[in-house]
């Protein structure tokens, strides 16, 4: 597979692949990194947002 | 039958489409959906509920990232759903992921500001996530399901 890197497009067989993930109440995140001779040459991140922003609306009463 | 004090759910949905105007309305050339954008902000930024409009201050910079960010697509109109005589929710969610393609963002960032680029870049919402960097890669924010409880932006009465 061809990977876009800071060195240009490279075949992933030449690179060291590292992956990670994070999951909590706010997000589910995965990332993939490719390293070449100890140098990070590609890092992509995919975040699935879980938490929304909400606002409570209210109709006040006459006192 | 009895009357119940409430804010109508239809009103909340109509707020999301600029149906009501209690003040001075913005001038609209058409009734078309506004254009919204998503800008990324550094960990050191302070975008929050007090943010009124997009600013390039402490926005990320890097290869292939254009100041102001990318377009956020709202392909599905807001929905207003009533749940009782007093409660309801109006909600809307971008219909596609927010994607920054082939970017290099080496300074850590942890927030996206959604704003209305049609209406003077006025702010809509801030969404935070774990601090990230991107190197010659793609950064993708996938949206939650567009439901009464999970939609990205909600106005609710209880």
Image (cartoon, helix red, strand yellow):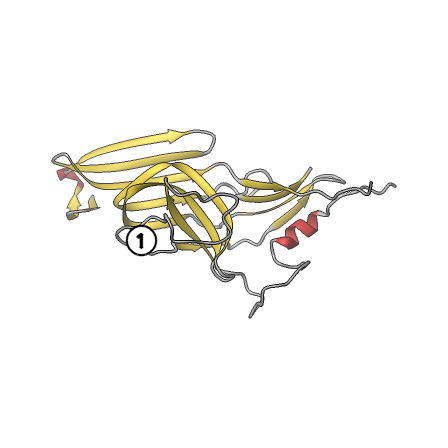
Q: Residue at x 60, y 53 (%)?
A: B16
For label 1, count other residues whose C-alpha is less than 10 Å away and answer few (under 14), some (14-19) or many (20+).
Answer: some
Q: Position of residue B141 (x, y in %)?
A: 40, 44
Position of the C terminus of chain A, as image quadrant, is top right
Tag 1 residue? B65
Please tell me which residue lies in front, B75 or B53: B53
Name the residue at 62% across, 63% down.
B25
Residue under the image location 41 percent in, 34 percent down: A28
Instruction: Indicate the chain on which mark 1 is placed.
Output: B
Quarter of the figure with the N terminus of chain A: top left
x and y percent of residue B69 in the render?
38, 54
**Is residue B49 left or right of A10 when viewed as pictured?**
right
Is A24 left, or right, of B9 in this rendering? left
Which residue, as the protein is rendered here, is positioned at the far right? B1
Above or below — where is B131 with respect to B80? Answer: above
Locate residue B1: give its quadrant. Answer: top right
Residue at (66% x, 49% y) in the render: B12
Q: Quadrant of residue B54?
A: bottom left
Q: Secondary structure at mark 1?
A: loop
Left or right, B2 with respect to B132, comes to right
Q: Position of residue B93 (x, y in %)?
A: 52, 47
């Amino acid at each position: 597979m061809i990977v876009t890197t800071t060195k240009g497009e490279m075949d992933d067989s030449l690179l060291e692949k590292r992956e990670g993930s994070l999951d909590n109440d706010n997000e589910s995140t995965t990332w993939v990194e490719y390293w070449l001779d100890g140098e990070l040459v590609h890092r992509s991140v995919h975040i699935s947002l879980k938490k929304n922003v909400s606002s409570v609306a209210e109709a006040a009463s006459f006192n | 039958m009895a009357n119940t004090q409430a804010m109508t759910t239809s009103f909340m949905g109509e707020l999301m489409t600029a149906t009501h105007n209690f003040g001075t309305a913005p001038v609209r050339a058409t009734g078309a959906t506004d254009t919204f954008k998503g800008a990324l902000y550094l960990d050191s930024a302070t975008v929050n509920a007090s943010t009124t409009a997009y600013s390039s201050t402490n926005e990320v910079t890097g290869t292939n990232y254009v100041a102001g960010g990318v377009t956020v697509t709202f392909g599905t109109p807001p929905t207003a759903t009533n749940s009782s005589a007093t409660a309801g929710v109006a909600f809307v969610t971008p219909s596609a992921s927010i994607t920054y393609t082939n970017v290099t963002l080496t300074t850590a960032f942890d927030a996206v500001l959604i704003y209305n680029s049609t209406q003077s870049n006025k702010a809509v919402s801030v969404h935070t996530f774990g601090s990230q960097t991107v190197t010659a890669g793609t950064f993708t924010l996938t949206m939650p399901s567009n439901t009464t409880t999970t939609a990205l932006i909600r106005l609710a009465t209880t």
